[in-house]
Amino acid sequence: MPPLGTINLHASLLPRYRGAAPINWAIINGETETGITTFFINDKIDTGNIISYRSTIIEPEETAGELHDKLMKSGADLVTETVSAIAGHKVISIPQVKLMPPEQELRKAPKIYHDQCLINWDDKVANIHNFIRGLSPQPGAFTYFTMADGQKQHIKVYKSIPECKLHFLNAGQIITDHKTSLKVAASDGFIHISEIQPAGRKTLSIADFLRGAGRNIS
């Protein structure tokens, strides 16, 4: 084993969001802050002593892909600083147990599977919006549109705009002008869909979709 230890870079402020998908889960859960952490690896996943960290703001409309790219750049700098500190014997690492919030369960970040990415239109607008951007572009939140012929089409949703508004429509009901606008009813408002990917096709703006196959949406 390396005499000075083995390090890892994790895309959260440990000990929060241990696991395979910290960026996705932070956005899905509506967090407004996250960051990156370097730590010494031990025999358990993401539990080793912390060396250093940097925090960053999660912007209200930021997607997982955009946050990933932002953290990737700052992560490269943090790894370089961490290696230099270790080489110079200037590191005083901190056991994660000392950073555990008292009487509060730590949020985790397990791997996300396809069947977990189905949008629940019965949920609140804010939760659905965070769910969509937290899974964009990978693995991608999805729903089904019913076409005029009764066939259901698998649709990945990459970008949305939330609208909180009282209505009396059924959750999941689609409202569209068949030209440039499509929104879906949620429990406390609407989700305006702006960028999608129909199964087997490229990513489209909602206007392009409605000019094509979307003209037949029921």
Image: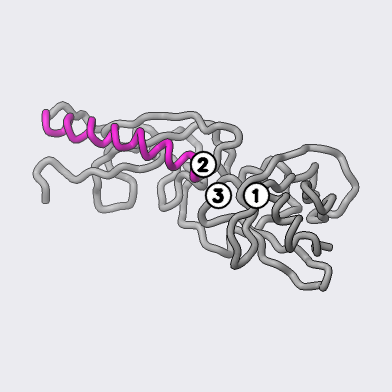
What range is drawn magenta here? 65-88
Q: Tell me residue 105's x, y (percent).
A: 50, 42
Q: Earlier in the sequence, mark 3 or mark 2?
A: 2
Reply above or below: 130 against 204.
Answer: above
Let me know if residue 113 is in the magenta part.
Answer: no
Q: Tell me residue 98's x, y (percent).
A: 34, 32
Q: Earlier in the sequence, mark 1 or mark 3?
A: 3
Res 15 → quadrant: top left
Q: For the point 44% across and 44% down, which residue is it?
A: 17
Instruction: Give the number of the disc on residue 157.
Output: none
Q: Secondary structure at mark 3?
A: loop
Q: Which residue is mark 1?
A: 195
- CA distance separating discs 2 and 1: 22 Å
Q: Amino acid at mark 2?
A: Ala
Q: Quadrant of the C terminus?
A: bottom right
Q: Which residue is mark 3?
A: 136
Q: Nearer the viewer, residue 101 or 83?
A: 83
Q: Secondary structure at mark 1?
A: strand
Reply above or below: 190 against 203.
Answer: above
Q: Earlier in the sequence, mark 2 or mark 1?
A: 2
Q: Tell me residue 212's x, y (percent).
A: 73, 60
Query: How dense is the environment of label 3, judged by Cα within 10 Å: few (below 14), some, or many (20 and up)?
Result: many
Q: Which residue is mark 2?
A: 26
Q: For the point 11% across and 51% down, which residue is it?
A: 1
Q: Nearer the viewer, residue 104 or 53?
A: 53
> Which of the two discs, 2 and 1, sits closer to the camera?
1
